[in-house]
Structure formats: structure tokens, C-alpha cells
Amino acid sequence: MPSHVHIPENILVSIWKERKFNKDIYAESGEKIEILESGDENKENGGPDFLNARVKIGNLTYVGDVEIDNTHADWKSHGHSINKRFNKVVLHAIVSNESNQNYVYTQDGRKINTICFAQFIDNSVIESIRKSIVLEDEKKTNKIHCYKVSGFADEQTKIDFLAGLGIERFRKKCEKMVTRLRELIFIDSLKLKEPVTHYSFPKEIYEDKLSADNLNDKYIWEQLFYESIFEALGYSQNRQIMIKMTHALPISFIESLELPANEFIDAVESMFFSVSGLIPNTAELKDENTIAYIRKMSEQWVKIKDNYKGETFESTDWHFFKLRPQNFPTLRMAAGARLVKKILREDLISSIMKKFYEIHNYTVLKNALRTLLIIKGDGYWKKHFMFDKSASEDTHYFLGNTRADEIFINVILPFVYVYFDLFNKRNSQIKLYQFIPASLLKPRTALSMR
């Protein structure tokens, strides 16, 4: 099989995982390779493709990670050479070595053997690879699967079909929120502080009927809203780690500290950046503004850390690669700190509910809620997008119009719907239907969460 053919990543992963090689394999340096254990497939965003692999190279056995790419150049072009997540890689497996290089180098300067495995692939899988490549090419036409028959459907049928997809998406968001509510109720009943102990949720909590008594705890709704907002702030790349951070640092813990108003933002930022593991060592920094900011964060964290019993994370858990600076997790945490202040000190959730009761026009409602959500840039993060990295221009908004509108659609609407449904506020629920475009939700569709 030609080594320059681009093979879909899922096929490459399958070849490595199942060791579909027809003979002994060798690194580009000439050393013999034995795959003792393929490792655990890494299904999270970012990081090497396989973790904790055992690979014998020459006479030495290495335990570490394996990264699989199509070309040798992908190591640099994908940012692996500057990403600390790849410092434990022990083997770089590729299809094409167009540059004739035997090694790649990690962020900390360690040399890693490269294996070009196109020549070692078992003949039995070549045909399936070719078919997969054809399927990938078909996908690149940017046409939906039903494009060949869509001309036979009238306009209303297409609208109804798209409306059904929108309804199903909305339903899943609501169901996800109800599931998390059940978990939060269970956690609260045991007085657990996540994630001091790891535990599984009993099946019964997802089946028991919810009552007003166990839904009246204000903290449960604040925590659900807090988690949902941070998930939205994380986008796809940092969504999971944002959720983990809100579990480790629940909003009830922040509220329990009774922070002075003039220190609230600094204290919350210090918690977010300390727990996230993103604060660098000041000895490595040159920017005086950054050093002063970190010292301020450290002073705040010293007052708090003895009371904190939750998990902490590493800087390598966070994704910056291929993100616009505006979407960096640092700026999103700065926005999140100010949203937490709105939740705890300005009663943001009640303000949102009040808007739904008072406003009867969708556009007016969306604009009113956008005003509540927009966060203007200020402080250290107005002029920086990473620690010790000054922005070329000031960040005027940590959370602007576009992201506020997305949060309105993806967080606030399902959150309010679930609230109305669980408290049996049918009149308000009917109004909510009116706030969502008629092409998305239709009265005949049952969305009850109880």
C-alpha cells in the first residue's frame, strides 16, 4: 500500500489497537519494535492516542504513551512538540515519513523513535482501508446523507423534519439537566463534597419520582446552573475539564467562604486558577504585571486552601491549541468568576426567571437576558490572554453578544423549561413554548421531564 495515502484516524487506531501487522516491525532508526501492550485508547479531547502502552525498542522496554499520525510532519503541525501532554510519548507511529526523519522531540526535549507502519500492515486490512478512504472522500462533499432524495420532499416536510431534530436536541438537553439534578439531590442527601470520595450513583435515583420537597434547595439549582454555564464556556475542547472543575469546586463552597465584596472576583479567580493548575511558577516569568497578579492570587489562595478538600488539576489538562485567544480557558474562567458573582451576589437565576414571567416577546426577552449575561473585560485579563502573554489589544468583553446568545439557547432555555416542568408551572411553560421559534418546538410534542 502506498505510504503517502491519507488513512482515516479511526482506521489507524484500529490497526494499532489490534496489532494488524503481517511481520516484524522496525523503527525508522532500524531498531526492532515489539508491541507488548497497545495501551488504553484515549477518547478524551487532546493528548496522545494511546496511554500506558508497553513497547520494546531494541533491548529496552518502555512504558508510556503512543501517538499515531498520518505523516511525520503532523507531530509539529498538530502542536505535539510544544504540548506537555505529549511528554510521556515513547513511540510516534506514522503512515508516511516524507521528510525521512527517524525521530521527533517532546516539549521537554526528549527524543522519540518513529515507526512508519504502512509497509507492515497486514494485507487482510488493506481492502477495508481503501473502502474507508472512499467513504471519507464522500463525506467531503459537504452534503447531508439524504441530499439525493431531498428534492422529492416539499418545503413543509423539510421544515417539519428539521423541527423534529431541533426538538430532539432540546429534549436531550433537558433530560441531561434532570439527570444531573437527581445526582445533586443524592449528593446533598449524603452531605458529600465532590470529589473527596469517589462513588457511584445507585440506579434508584434515576427512577424515583421527584417531589417539590427535594427540589426546593436553592443550592441544587445554583449548582446545576453553574455547571451548565461552565460547560458552555468550555466549548468542545475544554468542556469536560470545566465540568470536572465545577464538581471539584462546587458553588456552595464558594458561597460558604463569605467573601468580602471588594475581594470577591480576586478570590474566585484565585480558586479557579489554583484548582485548575494553570498558575505558572513566577521564577519562570518576566512580566511584572503577571508576577504581581500571581502574587495577589497566591495571597487569596492562602486564605482559602486549608478549607478546600477537592481535587486539583494540571495545566496539561487544558487545551489552548488551535483556539482563538478569546476562547482560551483563562479568559473563560475570568468570565466565569464574574458570572459566579452574579449568581451568588446578584441573584442571577431569579432575575432570569423574572424576565420570563414579565416579557412576552421572544426578541425582547433574548435581548434582556443577553444584557444579564454579557461580561465586560477588566483587570489583569483585559490585557492578557495567557499568563505572561500580553494581548495585542484590550479584551473589551470576556463574554460578548454571540456567546451570550448561545448560552441563552443552550443553557437558559432548557434550564428554565426543566424548572417550570418540575414545579408544574404549566402557564409559564406554555409561555416558554412561545419564546422558542415555532419551527423548533410544536405543541403536539410532549417534553415532560417528570
Image (cartoon, rainbow, N blue to C red):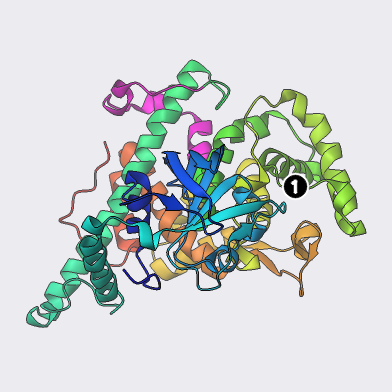
Magenta region includes residue 53: no
The residue sitting at 36% across, 28% down in the picture is 212
Front position in the image: 198 or 407: 198
Q: Amino acid at mark 1?
A: Ile
183 on left or right of 399: left
Furthest-bottom residue in this view: 151
Q: Residue at x 89, y 48 (%)?
A: 283
Residue 366 placement (x, y as % from top left)? 46, 65
- Identify the image quadrant of the N terminus: bottom left
Q: Between 297 and 444, which is closer to the camera in this rendering?
A: 297
Q: Position of residue 447 (x, y in %)?
A: 24, 48
Would residue 90 be found to the left or right of residue 141 on screen? right
Name the residue furthest top.
190
Vertical arrangement, residue 187 with respect to residue 297, above or below:
above
On the question of residue 158 being in view, the answer is yes
Which residue in the structure is indicated by mark 1? Answer: 265
What's the magenta region?
198-226
Question: Residue 196, position in %: x, y?
Answer: 58, 22
Specify the quadrant of the image occupied by residue 215: top left
Q: What SS does tag 1 mark?
A: helix
- Name the quarter where the C terminus is drawn: top left
**Above or below, 326 relative to 261:** below
* Residue in the picture at 34% in, 51% down: 23
